[in-house]
Image (spheres, grey):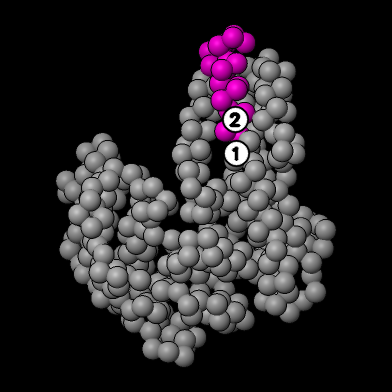
């Protein structure tokens, strides 16, 4: 639970401090007043990175550094310092201990719900892969490193393909890629199973319909022998991969599909059905993170109230009571009325 926040030279902020409520905090202001920047600061303090910008873009224009500070209810403190030069100077200070990177135990659990998420099911497969991987980074120790190593191995293999590398040159990267891919696919399949336990029931409750919603992770091979099957495919498809200049098989090419009564989203779901399913996923995300991290996550809602109709707004507010929540809006009246308890209003100009 965060009690206060200070932003120095961060994005549009020069030096601003905020007292925060343990319940609902509503950040109100016109467009370009810094509402999303405030949520972004909380995300950087929690997980270590922004969801939309490189480190050097987080520093206020023409300033050499930025600093973020929060205090938590348990008396602990955390600071993030970012230097603008080359975007390489980010450090984390947690209770006077300095870190260059945050491991999972040193992060704060957080769920971000922003307008782009509403296109999760209708957008590209990459969006859905990132959804699974971003959530896994918050609940599976070491997954961040596995994801990072897979990207590096994939980049190395692709570079060799473009250079016309031989079988002997490419093979070590085939082996490494396959090993990491197996870990990624098994984690994604397990997470999909967790999401599936609640998505159907929760969707029906939110929508009032009898539509059956099921998630399906579409992997090319079974998770239990994924490494062996992928390694064989990489060897057999080397010539084809050279021609196209990239690796055509692996978890970077797979998808999470949402089925409505057995039909893929793109074939049958209406815009309202898709938004209800995404809302259900975000609510389940809260529950999964709280269960596995054994602490309630922060909930950041970036202008999603304006994207949801009255029924879905009401449904969302029913589930966020246990969480410290930050909501951005241009119209406080449209949000405040959904909360029976008093909300902390943070006005921006």
Disc sitting over residue 42 in the figure: none
Q: Where is 269 relative to 130, above or below?
A: below
Left or right? Give the position of 180 relative to 95: right
Q: Residue at 60% of width from left, 30% of height from top?
A: 179
Q: Disc 1 to disc 2, how far (Cα)?
A: 7 Å
Quarter residue 209 falls in: bottom right
Under circle 2, the secondary element is helix
Front one among 289 and 132: 289
Q: In the rendered structure, does residue 168 fall within the stretch colored magenta?
A: yes
- Quickly name the residue at label 1: 183
Front one among 51 and 223: 223
Using a 10 Å C-alpha cutoff, classify the residue at mark 2 as few (fewer than 14 neighbours), some (14 to 19) or many (20 or more). Answer: some
Q: Quadrant of the C terminus?
A: bottom left
Q: Where is 332 relative to 200, above or below?
A: below
- Quickly name the residue at label 2: 179
Q: In the rendered structure, does residue 73 fall within the stretch colored magenta?
A: no
Q: Are marks 1 and 2 in contact (CB under 8 Å)?
A: yes
Quarter residue 86 falls in: top left
Under circle 1, the secondary element is helix
Q: Residue at 63% of width from left, 36% of height from top?
A: 182
Res. 336 in view: yes
Front one among 13 and 165: 165
Using a 10 Å C-alpha cutoff, classify the residue at mark 1 as few (fewer than 14 neighbours), some (14 to 19) or many (20 or more). Answer: some
Q: Residue at 65% of width from left, 51% of height from top?
A: 190
From the top left corner, tell me how far across and down residue 140 is, in percent.
Answer: 52, 50
From the top left corner, tell me how far across and down residue 35 is, in percent.
Answer: 35, 67
Q: Where is 128 relative to 239, above or below?
A: below
Q: Residue furthest right?
A: 262
Name the main secondary structure of what is drawn in magenta: helix
Please report the bounds of the magenta region as a residue range: 160-181
């Amino acid at each position: 639970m965060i009690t206060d926040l200070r932003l120095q030279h961060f994005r549009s902020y020069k030096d601003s401090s905020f007292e925060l409520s343990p319940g609902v905090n509503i950040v109100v202001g016109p467009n370009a007043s810094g509402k999303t920047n405030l949520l972004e600061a909380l995300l950087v303090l929690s997980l270590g990175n922004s969801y939309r910008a490189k480190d050097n873009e987080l520093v206020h224009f023409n300033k050499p550094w930025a600093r973020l500070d929060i205090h938590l209810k348990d008396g602990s403190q955390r600071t993030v310092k970012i230097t603008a030069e080359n975007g390489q100077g980010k450090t984390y200070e947690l209770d006077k201990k300095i870190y260059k990177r945050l491991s999972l135990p040193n992060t704060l659990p957080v769920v971000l719900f922003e307008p782009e998420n509403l296109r999760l099911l209708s957008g590209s497969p990459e969006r859905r892969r990132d959804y699974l991987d971003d959530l896994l980074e918050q609940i599976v120790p070491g997954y961040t490193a596995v994801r990072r190593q897979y990207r590096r191995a994939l980049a190395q293999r692709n570079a060799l393909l473009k250079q016309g590398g031989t079988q002997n040159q490419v093979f070590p990267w085939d082996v490494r890629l396959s090993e990491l891919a197996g870990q990624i696919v098994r984690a994604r399949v397990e997470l999909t199973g967790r999401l599936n336990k609640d998505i159907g029931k929760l969707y029906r409750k939110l929508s009032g319909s009898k539509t059956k919603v099921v998630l399906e992770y579409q992997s090319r091979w079974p998770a239990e022998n994924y490494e062996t099957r992928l390694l064989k495919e990489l060897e057999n498809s080397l010539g084809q991969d050279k021609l196209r200049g990239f690796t055509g098989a692996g978890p970077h090419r797979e998808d999470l599909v949402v089925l409505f009564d057995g039909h893929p989203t793109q074939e049958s779901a209406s815009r309202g059905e898709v938004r209800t399913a995404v809302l259900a996923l975000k609510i389940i995300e809260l529950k999964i993170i709280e269960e596995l991290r054994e602490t309630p996550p922060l909930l950041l809602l970036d202008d999603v109230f304006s994207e949801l109709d009255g029924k879905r707004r009401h449904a969302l507010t029913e589930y966020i009571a246990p969480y410290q929540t930050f909501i951005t809006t241009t119209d406080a009246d449209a949000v405040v009325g959904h909360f029976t308890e008093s909300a902390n209003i943070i006005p921006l100009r």
